[in-house]
């Protein structure tokens, strides 16, 4: 569990089919963005999320704060100990009780995942401007529900498969294939319990499966545009950490 916490995605076809595929893709994405309230989502400047995570028979609470365009911090109470993971727009850092009281720099996959936490708008939105490739792969049956399958290949090579409900146009499943230390791993996510808040459709639970390890994240509340000072995302000095421990 601790490793997962320290951590959390060509075929040339005929010209005519490419045009038809592009039309289907654009239509599906337009309806998806309309359904989830993407336009209103883009106007939100900060998010503050309270919830809990259930994993390996244990449950702990967390609060995550995100500020556009690229800052986030998550604090989790794990068996009475505080874990903090953050990205300040350029650098990522971590405070984990099992490592020690001092902040640690995030590197490699951990830094990449921390940076992706700031991607509030999602990879599908403006995918061309971001240098990604997107392909419509037709429809599939997902436990009796017809879904559109869309493949997104990120510019760095990771692949994400989205399964979008053909009626509600919300994402029911997301599969990510990524390379970690030379090995390809697959992460399945199942967003659910969608609720409308301020015109934005938000999943209030997400179940994930990472290499057989199941995790469920439940969001108790989501607050928009609470004032967040940039200083909360900055890695604290060692003396600040020691003072915080004394206060606790």
Image (cartoon, rainbow, N blue to C red):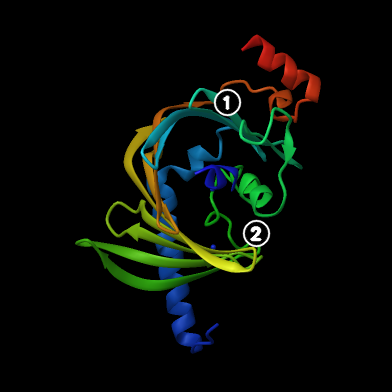
- Is the residue under label 2 in contact with that under label 1 (CB below 8 Å)? no
SS at circle 1? strand
Image quarter of residue 53: top left
Q: Is residue 49 visible?
A: no
Residue 78: x percent and y percent?
50, 29
- Closer to the chain start, of discs 1 and 2, is 1
Residue 118's x, y, as percent?
A: 61, 42
Name the residue beneath numbered marker 2: 130
Q: Residue furthest top?
A: 247
Left or right relative to 171: residue 179: right
Which disc number belongs to residue 82?
1
- Picture residue at 54% right of the left edge, 63% below the top: 9
User: Is 96 or 192 nearer to us in this picture?
Assistant: 96
Label 2, residues with CA under 10 Å away: few <14, some 14-19, many ≥20? few
Q: Residue furthest bottom?
A: 14
Quarter in which the C terminus is drawn = top right
Q: Tell me, yes or no, if residue 232 can be seen here.
A: yes
The quarter of the displayed image where residue 97 is located: top right
Residue at (39%, 35%) from the top-left corner? 58
The percent coordinates of residue 155 (x first, y second) are 65, 66
Q: Is residue 128 left or right of residue 40?
A: right
Q: Nearer the viewer, residue 108 or 163?
A: 108
Residue that appears at 55% across and 82% down: 10
The one of 178 and 27 positioned closer to us in this rendering: 178
Say above or below: 234 vs 9. above
Whole-number angstrom distance, CA of label 1 to CA of label 2: 35 Å
Give the image quarter of residue 210. Answer: bottom left
Q: Position of residue 164 (x, y in %)?
A: 36, 58
- Relative to 126, residue 132 above or below: below
């Amino acid at each position: 569990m601790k490793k997962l916490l320290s951590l959390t995605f060509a075929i040339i076809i005929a010209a005519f089919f490419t045009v038809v595929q592009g039309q289907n893709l654009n239509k599906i994405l337009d309806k998806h963005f309309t359904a989830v309230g993407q336009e209103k989502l883009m106007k939100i400047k900060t998010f503050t999320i309270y919830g809990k995570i259930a994993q390996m028979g244990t449950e702990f609470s967390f609060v995550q704060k995100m500020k556009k365009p690229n800052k986030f911090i998550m604090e989790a109470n794990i068996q009475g100990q505080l874990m903090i993971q953050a990205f300040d727009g350029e650098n990522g850092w971590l405070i984990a009780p099992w490592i020690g009281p001092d902040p640690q720099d995030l590197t490699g996959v951990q830094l990449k995942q921390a940076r992706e936490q700031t991607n509030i708008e999602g990879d599908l939105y403006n995918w061309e401007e971001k240098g990604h490739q997107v392909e419509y792969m037709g429809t599939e049956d997902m436990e009796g529900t017809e879904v559109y399958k869309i493949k997104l290949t990120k510019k760095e090579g990771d692949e994400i498969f989205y399964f979008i409900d053909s009626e509600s146009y919300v994402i029911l499943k997301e599969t990510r294939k990524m390379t970690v230390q030379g090995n390809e791993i697959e992460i399945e996510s199942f967003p659910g319990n969608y609720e409308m808040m301020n015109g934005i459709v938000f999943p209030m639970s997400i179940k994930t499966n990472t290499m057989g390890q199941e995790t469920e994240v439940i969001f108790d509340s989501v607050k928009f545009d609470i004032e967040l000072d940039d200083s909360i995302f900055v890695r604290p000095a060692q003396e600040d950490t020691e003072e915080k421990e004394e206060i606790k």
